[in-house]
Amino acid sequence: MDILKNLVLGTYFAILTVLSIYGAHRLWMLVLYFRHKKDVPQPKGDSNYLPHVTVQLAIFNEINVVERLVDSVIRMDWPKEKLEIQLLDDSTDETRGFAQAVCARYQALGYDIQHLHRTDRTGFKAGALHEGLKVAKGELVAMFDADFIPTEDFLRNAVPHFADTNVAFVQGCWAHINRDFSLLTQVQAILLDGHFVFEHTARNRSNAFFNFSGTAGMWRVKAIADAGGWQHDTITEDADLSYRAQLKGWTGVYLKDLVVPAELPVEVNAFKSQQHRWAKGNAQVIRKLMKTIWMSKESLHTKLECWFHLTANCNYMLMVVLAVLMVPAMVFRAGTPWYVLLATDGPFFLLNAVSVGLYFGLSQRELTDNRGWTKRIKYIPALMGLGIGLALNQAKAVLEGFFTDDKEFKRTPKLGVEAGGKSVQKRAYKVPKSLVTYLEALFAVYYFGALVVSIYIRKWASVPFLWLFFSGFAYMSLWSLSDVPLFRRLTTEELPDEVDENSFVQ
């Protein structure tokens, strides 16, 4: 029994130590951010710098949002004769005909817009972008995913930075048109805000590598080619290419105030699918590039930031083990004086809780549009709980990235949801339930039982932690299994009903 106790408690504290290191790194990101807050990137070009620009819009079965996407790109402020738009369409449903009609409408008005459809989805999004570049006219290429709504001034603000011939890419900041839709969208928005407000800004302005985020940004075509082009041996082709380009000596520019609105997934399974793809893709990038990064001549600061960025999702594997061990650890330590527990566990939990609270709470204050930011602080505990609830989903993704060769890109389908819940949905898509969902439900039951017992025996100090784990797993599993009409099912698999594409042509 002593051996088992020592093994459980040793593993328990080892995991808390590693998680605390990442918690300390979050605080370091805050230090870097505020140290460089005033170092706003300044463009070398001005309004007279007007290179030819290609805008690439990669879509797959996105009938709910494709018209909104194209309409917003058309409205961008750039000379018509120097703007090319490529609608890179891999769709297998009626999106194809609808997208063709949208493009034809603008072609008739004199816009250089092409509908490029592939029947062979080799390389998925990376393959579509690569094929589009073969016929692109621009020396610069902007990219927007289907759920984004580019602002009119995007090109006017981004392009001047390419007057510096060493700049490979410019990344804008994501905003969220439907952040107030539900608890889930509020938490997603805050999670993304932390990344885009603090991580990108701190890394870019402290001269470390930062990753291109796949959308709401631009590339120099020459830099793409020099870095080896779009490759599809990972499913986060954006991070892969941006790291390869920076290893070749190119630089990126992050513009925190270049804000591009986008739609957040409103359904739990769509959210989990998106997070799974990002975690799996980063694990694949670790396999592909981490050794090269560490063997490069880059600074230790750059190497460490690459490490913390790419390995962050690996912590979910530790979270799963911690979720299994937390209750046995409490049992083994039953009878331990409260002040001993406070001295041993307190610093770990305090560091992680404080770092999460400060990091994501302050991100709301530092947003370009931070109106009502204090009202969002109340969602931080839910963010912690849902972060725990994601552990099984993300751990599975990381393991797949490390130990399988599966490169299938599963896109996150969109409803066309806007602020207030208004939707222009033309077709419903669904996400199939996975084994992970049922495991999440089992963890919820496990922690509910532990919570009840803890209350019964009056172990009040354990209740907040048990509740956090229970609520996270319960939310993820119950909403994943629920068929509540409010959250329409989203997926790459269409429902069997047919829709007449001609009914959508204006």
Image (cartoon, rainbow, N blue to C red):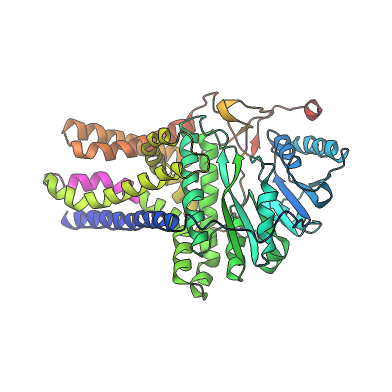
- Magenta stretch holds residue 238: no
Residue 230 visible in this rendered orientation of the protein? no
* Quadrant in which residue 423 is drawn: top right
Which range is magenta? 321-334
- Magenta stretch holds residue 329: yes
Q: Looking at this view, is 427 or 371 the one in front?
A: 371
Q: Position of residue 442 (x, y in %)?
A: 37, 37
Q: Looking at this view, is 435 or 202 the one in front?
A: 202
Q: How many numbered dots are placed on residues in this image?
A: 0
Q: Where 246 falls versus 395 (above or below)?
A: below
Residue 177 visible in this rendered orientation of the protein? yes
Residue occupying image coordinates x 49% and y 49%? 197
Q: Please state if 76 lies on the left or on the right of 43 as rendered.
A: right
Q: Main secondary structure of the magenta part?
A: helix
Residue occupying image coordinates x 52% and y 43%? 368
Residue occupying image coordinates x 27% and y 48%? 350
Q: Position of residue 298 (x, y in %)?
A: 51, 72
Q: Position of residue 347 (x, y in %)?
A: 24, 52
Q: Where 209 falls versus 172 (above or below)?
A: below
* Quadrant in which residue 422 is drawn: top right
Q: Position of residue 273 (x, y in %)?
A: 54, 43
Q: Please state if 264 lies on the left or on the right of 393 as rendered.
A: right
Indicate the quadrant containing the C terminus: top left, top right, bottom left or bottom right.
Answer: top right
Q: Looking at this view, is 441 or 191 the one in front?
A: 191
